[in-house]
Image: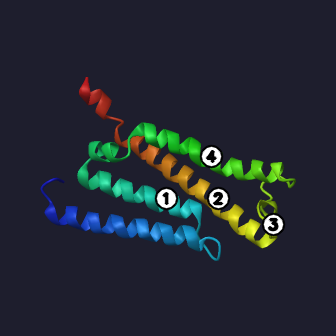
Amino acid sequence: MKDYLVLRVIAKLMIGFMLLFALYVQFHGDFGPGGGFQAGVIVAASIVLYAIIYGLDAARTVIPDRVIEALIAVGVLVFAGVGVAGLLLGGNYLDYFVLSGDPVHGQHRGIFWVEAGVLITVFAVMLKVFYLFASRGREADAE
């Protein structure tokens, strides 16, 4: 696809709007439909679009496999860390109201961090799955 200038320019524009929309979905998740899972899929789809237009090697240069594997662990740790913080502060696992002096603020804080952990994990897992499927026949071709 390196010869298709129009596709490359449109992809650059679309990727920016996709990431912006993912942020909207992420932060709108407190008040309506949306949240970390949907935003994570949108972010992963933007990188998949980049890989389709610019090539898998270019996408792996932008976000290498080791970064993706680290992000999977970080996302799970953020999610689980909110639950452990609730336990340490005297509540139950994933009780958000103890995360702040005001229970309403604690709820918002807890939901924000849980949704952030979900976004990171879903994004990284979806991208890892794409990388694995997209490179499936490449190892055999290299031999």
Question: On screen, 67 above or below 111?
Answer: above
In the picture of the structure, the residue carrying the numbered disc 2 is 113
In the picture of the structure, the residue carrying the numbered disc 4 is 76
Q: Are marks 2 and 1 in contact (CB under 8 Å)?
A: no
Classed neighbour count for the residue bearing mark 4: other residues with Cα under 10 Å, few (<14), some (14–19), many (≥20): some
**Residue 44: % across, % down:** 44, 55
Say what amino acid the circle numbered 1 marks: Val
Check disc 2 and report its element: helix, strand or loop: helix
Q: Based on the displayed image, in which of its 4 quarters is residue 96 positioned? A: bottom right
Which image quarter holds the C terminus?
top left
Q: Can you tell which of label 2 and label 1 is closer to the viewer?
A: 2
In the picture of the structure, the residue carrying the numbered disc 3 is 101
Q: Can you tell which of label 2 and label 4 is closer to the viewer?
A: 2
- Mark 2 vs mark 3, CA separation in Å: 17 Å
Q: Choose the circle earlier in sequence order: 1 or 4.
A: 1
Say what amino acid the circle numbered 2 marks: Trp
Q: Are marks 1 and 3 in contact (CB under 8 Å)?
A: no
Which residue of the protein is positioned furthest toward the left in this rendering?
3
Q: Can you tell which of label 1 and label 3 is closer to the viewer?
A: 3
Say what amino acid the circle numbered 4 marks: Val
The residue positioned 74% from the left and 70% from the top of the image is 105
**Foreground: 55 or 81?**
81
Check disc 4 and report its element: helix, strand or loop: helix
Q: Can you tell which of label 2 and label 3 is closer to the viewer?
A: 3
Q: Are marks 3 and 4 in contact (CB under 8 Å)?
A: no
Q: Choose the circle earlier in sequence order: 3 or 4.
A: 4
Check disc 1 and report its element: helix, strand or loop: helix
**Residue 78: % across, % down:** 64, 50
